Image: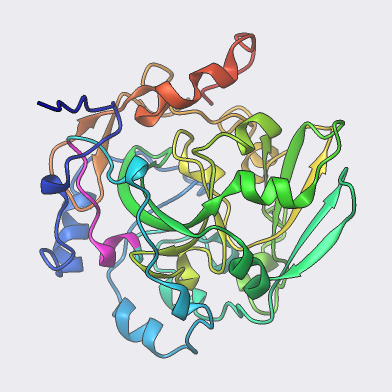
Amino acid sequence: MLLKRWKGWELPERAVTPESLFRNRRSLLKGLAAGPMVLSAAALTGCGDEATADGDPASMIAAVPPDPSAHLYPVKRNPAYADGGPDRPITVEDLATSYNNFYEFGSHKDIVRAAQDLKIRPWTVTLDGEVAKPKTIDIDDLLEQMPLEERVYRLRCVEAWSMVVPWSGFPLAALVKLAEPLSSAKYVRMETFMDPEMARGQKQHWYPWPYIEGLTIEEATNDLAFIATGIYGKPMPRQNGAPLRLAVPWKYGFKSTKSIVRFTFTSERPVSFWEELQASEYGFWANVNPDVPHPRWSQASERPLGGGAKVPTLLYNGYAEQVAGLYKGLEGERLFM
């Protein structure tokens, strides 16, 4: 008899919530809001603030031009990343595509409507810095040559809420290989678009635009590191970071930068967007750890998006087996902030 031993992050298929099971966004968000959540008065948060239920996300999305990459989806699910864990059902699509944050379009949760202004074509991706030869690639050319697959990952917000999402995309390691970094490159610096006329949030001068994030080369080439280009078997919605965003499930959500236009390979550690704003609360590493509280709230537990009881937060968000080895010898660093 073949016995399967569940890993810390896996979820049996029978536990996955059907997409059609919950459709009432208002009541679900109300359930989430009923739980305690500590927010910064200055909106210094990595992936969320208060929820609103104004507008119908489906009708807003239907009103914008279709994504030219739609014919590529759905893609085959990678069986090694088929679910989110034994107690983590896949989050309802309506919630995952409306309860999100995109500071380029405003520092609030009612972001779906504003984010539809994001122009996703033309879109190019630049690979530069300490590489064999800098290059700029059209997004559709990039998608055609990348090994697209679907992976179900947990996402843990620094604000102590979480969701489980089926991302489509490709391993970040494939992009690193395409870039051909030199041996001197120790980090990957990721940069989002900059267009204040299109994204009015970028007119807020107190934020250090454009949004910057970074990983070490070792993190970027870990098998978990993923560039997401779609969600729920469809192209990435604008409000979720179209046309491509980072997904690093062992880190807090603010590391998963959206709408990336540049990957720069460098020997110097990048200073990320939130780190520049408030380094004492949002550091470079941002690995999930229930035993290391945020300066203003506990990280010991989380509330799954959609309401219900809190669940314990896991070290590295349940992915310790895959990533803990990346941080050996770095015990002096603030790995969990």
Residue at figure coordinates x 10%, y 47% from the top left: 14
User: Along the line of sight, which residue is nearer the eye, 122 or 141?
Assistant: 141
Residue at figure coordinates x 45%, y 26% from the top left: 322
In magenta stretch: residue 89: yes
Residue at figure coordinates x 59%, y 11% from the top left: 328
Above/below status of 83 relative to 282? below
For the image shown, how many numbered marks are present on the structure?
A: 0
Q: Quadrant of residue 74?
A: bottom left
Above/below status of 79 relative to 21? above
Q: Residue furthest front?
A: 1
Give the colouring mode of the picture: rainbow
Residue at figure coordinates x 62%, y 37% from the top left: 221
Q: Quadrant of residue 280?
A: top right
Viewed as shown, does residue 239 lie left or right of 151?
Answer: right
Residue 92 spot, x, y in % from top left: 23, 60
Residue bounds of the magenta highlight = 87-96
Would residue 45 be seen by someone viewing this image from the given angle?
no
User: Along the line of sight, which residue is nearer the eye, 187 or 312?
Assistant: 187
In what quadrant of the picture does the C terminus appear? top right
Viewed as shown, does residue 233 lie left or right of 11?
Answer: right
Q: Quadrant of residue 158?
A: top left
Residue 72 spot, x, y in % from top left: 47, 74
Residue 106 spot, x, y in % from top left: 53, 65
Residue 54 spot, x, y in % from top left: 30, 75
User: Along the line of sight, which residue is nearer the eye, 116 or 226?
Assistant: 226
Would residue 133 be seen by someone viewing this image from the given angle?
yes
In what quadrant of the picture does the N terminus appear? top left
Viewed as shown, does residue 32 lie left or right of 193?
Answer: left
Most frequent secondary structure within the magenta stretch: loop
